[in-house]
Protein backbone atom coordinates (compact mmCIF):
# COMPACT_ATOMS: atom_id res chain seq x y z
CA UNK A 1 0.00 0.00 0.00
CA UNK A 2 2.77 2.43 0.91
CA UNK A 3 4.57 1.63 -2.36
CA UNK A 4 1.40 2.46 -4.32
CA UNK A 5 1.18 5.87 -2.64
CA UNK A 6 4.83 6.57 -3.39
CA UNK A 7 4.35 5.53 -7.02
CA UNK A 8 1.36 7.89 -7.33
CA UNK A 9 3.42 10.75 -5.88
CA UNK A 10 6.13 10.17 -8.46
CA UNK A 11 3.59 10.30 -11.30
CA UNK A 12 1.76 13.25 -9.80
CA UNK A 13 -1.90 13.10 -8.97
CA UNK A 14 -4.58 15.50 -7.87
CA UNK A 15 -8.25 14.89 -7.18
CA UNK A 16 -10.96 17.36 -6.26
CA UNK A 17 -14.47 16.54 -5.07
CA UNK A 18 -17.00 19.36 -4.80
CA UNK A 19 -20.13 18.84 -2.75
CA UNK A 20 -23.00 21.30 -3.32
CA UNK A 21 -20.49 24.16 -3.86
CA UNK A 22 -20.08 24.22 -0.07
CA UNK A 23 -17.37 21.61 0.56
CA UNK A 24 -14.22 20.57 -1.25
CA UNK A 25 -12.07 17.51 -0.65
CA UNK A 26 -8.67 17.67 -2.33
CA UNK A 27 -5.76 15.29 -2.70
CA UNK A 28 -2.30 15.87 -4.10
CA UNK A 29 -1.82 19.17 -2.22
CA UNK A 30 1.87 20.03 -1.82
CA UNK A 31 1.74 23.54 -0.32
CA UNK A 32 -0.67 26.30 0.71
CA UNK A 33 0.50 29.72 -0.48
CA UNK A 34 -2.14 31.94 1.19
CA UNK A 35 -5.67 31.82 2.47
CA UNK A 36 -8.35 34.01 3.98
CA UNK A 37 -12.13 33.90 3.91
CA UNK A 38 -12.32 35.03 0.24
CA UNK A 39 -9.40 33.24 -1.47
CA UNK A 40 -7.27 30.14 -0.99
CA UNK A 41 -4.20 29.70 -3.20
CA UNK A 42 -2.50 26.32 -3.07
CA UNK A 43 -0.22 24.09 -5.08
CA UNK A 44 -0.94 20.54 -6.11
CA UNK A 45 1.30 17.94 -7.67
CA UNK A 46 -0.13 19.07 -11.03
CA UNK A 47 0.11 22.85 -10.57
CA UNK A 48 -1.46 25.85 -8.91
CA UNK A 49 -5.11 26.05 -7.80
CA UNK A 50 -6.95 29.19 -6.69
CA UNK A 51 -10.28 28.85 -4.89
CA UNK A 52 -12.48 31.95 -4.54
CA UNK A 53 -15.62 32.40 -2.53
CA UNK A 54 -17.09 33.75 0.68
CA UNK A 55 -16.57 32.56 4.25
CA UNK A 56 -13.97 30.01 3.10
CA UNK A 57 -12.52 27.87 5.85
CA UNK A 58 -9.72 25.31 5.77
CA UNK A 59 -11.22 22.49 7.83
CA UNK A 60 -8.16 20.23 7.67
CA UNK A 61 -4.89 19.99 5.81
CA UNK A 62 -2.09 17.43 5.84
CA UNK A 63 0.86 18.15 3.61
CA UNK A 64 2.25 14.76 4.61
CA UNK A 65 -0.63 12.93 2.91
CA UNK A 66 -1.59 15.77 0.53
CA UNK A 67 -5.21 15.84 1.71
CA UNK A 68 -7.20 19.01 2.37
CA UNK A 69 -10.83 19.83 3.20
CA UNK A 70 -12.38 23.26 2.62
CA UNK A 71 -15.85 24.58 3.41
CA UNK A 72 -17.69 27.81 2.60
CA UNK A 73 -19.56 29.42 -0.29
CA UNK A 74 -17.38 28.40 -3.25
CA UNK A 75 -17.62 30.65 -6.32
CA UNK A 76 -14.73 29.60 -8.52
CA UNK A 77 -11.90 27.13 -9.00
CA UNK A 78 -9.05 28.29 -11.22
CA UNK A 79 -6.11 26.16 -12.22
CA UNK A 80 -2.81 27.81 -13.05
CA UNK A 81 0.36 26.70 -14.76
CA UNK A 82 1.03 22.95 -14.58
CA UNK A 83 4.78 23.61 -14.38
CA UNK A 84 4.58 25.59 -11.13
CA UNK A 85 4.18 22.98 -8.42
CA UNK A 86 5.64 24.92 -5.51
CA UNK A 87 5.56 28.39 -3.99
CA UNK A 88 7.22 31.27 -5.76
CA UNK A 89 10.18 33.05 -4.27
CA UNK A 90 9.60 36.44 -2.62
CA UNK A 91 11.18 38.09 -5.67
CA UNK A 92 8.84 36.20 -8.01
CA UNK A 93 5.78 37.29 -6.02
CA UNK A 94 6.66 40.95 -6.63
CA UNK A 95 6.12 40.50 -10.36
CA UNK A 96 3.04 38.36 -10.11
Image: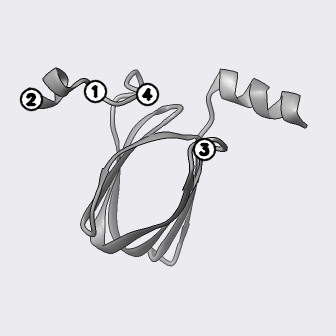
Q: Earlier in the sequence, mark 3 or mark 2?
A: 3
Q: Are the residues flagged by discs 3 and 2 in contact, CB closer than 8 Å? A: no
Q: Earlier in the sequence, mark 1 or mark 3?
A: 3
Q: In the rendered image, which residue does mark 2 sit on? A: 94
Q: What is the number of the mark on residue 85? A: 4
Q: Earlier in the sequence, mark 4 or mark 2?
A: 4
Distance from disc 3 to disc 2, alpha carbons, whole Å, reads 27 Å
Where does residue 85 sit, x and y in percent of width and height?
43, 27
Measured along the vertical axis of the image, is residue 1 above or below residue 56? above
Where does the N terminus fall, quadrant-wise?
A: top right
Q: Earlier in the sequence, mark 2 or mark 1?
A: 1
Circle 3 — which element?
loop
- For the residue pair 5 and 60, the one nearer the viewer reads as 60
Measured along the vertical axis of the image, is residue 34 above or below residue 94? below
Measured along the vertical axis of the image, is residue 21 above or below residue 83? below
3 vs 4, front mark:
3
Q: In the rendered image, which residue does mark 1 sit on? A: 88
Q: Earlier in the sequence, mark 3 or mark 4?
A: 3
Amino acid sequence: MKQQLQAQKLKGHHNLISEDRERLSLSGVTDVDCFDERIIRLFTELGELTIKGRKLHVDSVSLETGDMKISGDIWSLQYGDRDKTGPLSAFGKLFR
